[in-house]
Amino acid sequence: MKKRYGISLGVSPREPLSRTAELARRIDLRGFEALWYIDFQLGMKDVYAAMNLAALSTEKVLIGAGVTNLVTRHPTVTANATAALDELSSGRAVLGLGAGWSAVLGAGGTPSRLKELRSGIDEFRQLFSGEPCDLYGSQVRLATAKRQVPIYLAVSQPAMLQLAGETCDGAVLMGAADPEFCSWQLDYIHQGLEAAGRDRRQLTVDLFVTMSVGDDVESATDDVRAWATSQAATFHQWKRMPPAWERFRPEFARAAGQYGLVDHLSLQAEHKLTVSDDFVRSVALAGDLGMCVDRIRQLWQLDIDRITFALLSGGREQRLAQLADTVIGAVEAGGGS
């Protein structure tokens, strides 16, 4: 069976929006199945401007926010914008939804709780039906709705993982590119599917992976350190995690204390100095080609449907070519499921 891959990226403040269309076209032509754009209003250019440009320049790739939230835009606004994206892309829009972190905190808000996300998912279903529905204290109808746009929930912790299994079309599996960690997460998704009486085929599990490939392991590690630090800051709030990862708790606390919201994923972020090489290489893929390919093959042994790679800033076209031609080419050459 052919393996399925996606790309995740944000349009950085230094990157002209005019380049978005051409990069999206290249991603589409290389056969990637999904294209996710980061929604972070303080650190990235507008996600809907980027997605709409991508929609007009591509033919096959699915396009969505990876991910948006219920706080910085009202669900009716998000649903309407998503319907427009779906029209521009001829039915290729997907809605990526999460509790919200950097985008929500940057707007002075509070990330959504589980109950709020469950209600939000139901609200989007009703809005995308195009039928009158009783919401927000009145009867409303999304006049632009044409179909039920697939809803993917960004998940990492147990309750969210279960919710995705119970209610969503897809799960954006976030956390770590570590087989043991991911297997632990997938158990909770399976519990959610079982609790709702759903078939596994009703859910697309998309594992997000951050990777830097290079013969200089130290340089590759530094390349993904800022992203790894952002993950460590979120892990600080977790009550449960795989036993083997408990050793990193002190690093999580340091990262949470020094994390800089505006810098977030910036390669120049000062907070990236708070985590160890051991943690970075556990949460991300950083090393030579052989090491990265071996880990990707291990991840493909898990019950996932797609692997989406973060396309880091700095020479994106070269990174894309390396990923598509060298890394994925080597993974595919190894065979397997």
Image (cartoon, helix red, strand yellow):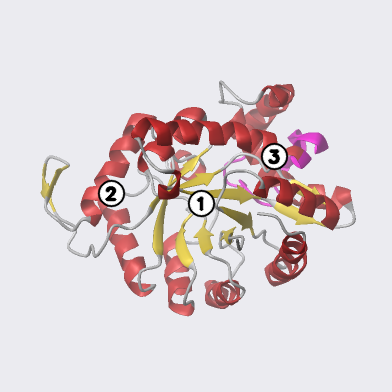
Mark 1 Cα within 10 Å, few/some/many (few <14, many 20+)?
some
Q: Nearer the viewer, mark 1 or mark 2?
A: 2
Q: Is residue 132 left or right of residue 288?
A: left
Type of amino acid at the residue the image marks with label 1: Leu
Which is nearer the eye, 336 or 83?
A: 336
The image shows residue 95, relative to residue 23, as above or below, that is above
Name the residue that disc number 3 marks: 178
Asked which secondary structure carries label 3, the reply is loop
Q: Pinpoint residue 239: horizontal percent, then vertical percent.
A: 56, 20
Magenta span of residues: 260-281
Displayed quadrant of residue 196: top left
**Mark toward the viewer: 3 or 1:** 3
User: Does residue 99 show up magenta in the picture?
Assistant: no
Q: Nearer the viewer, residue 268 or 231?
A: 231
Given the image, on which type of amino acid does mark 2 rest? Phe
Badge 3 crowding class, 10 Å Cα cut-off, few under 14, some 14 to 19, many 20 or more, is some
State the separation of the CA atoms marked 2 and 3. Answer: 32 Å
Q: Give the Cα separation between the discs numbered 3 and 1.
A: 30 Å
Kind of element beneath mark 1: loop
What percent of the width, then of the height, locates residue 146? 24, 65
Q: Amino acid at mark 3?
A: Asp
> Mark 2 highlights which residue?
124
Q: Verify whether residue 274 appears in magenta.
A: yes
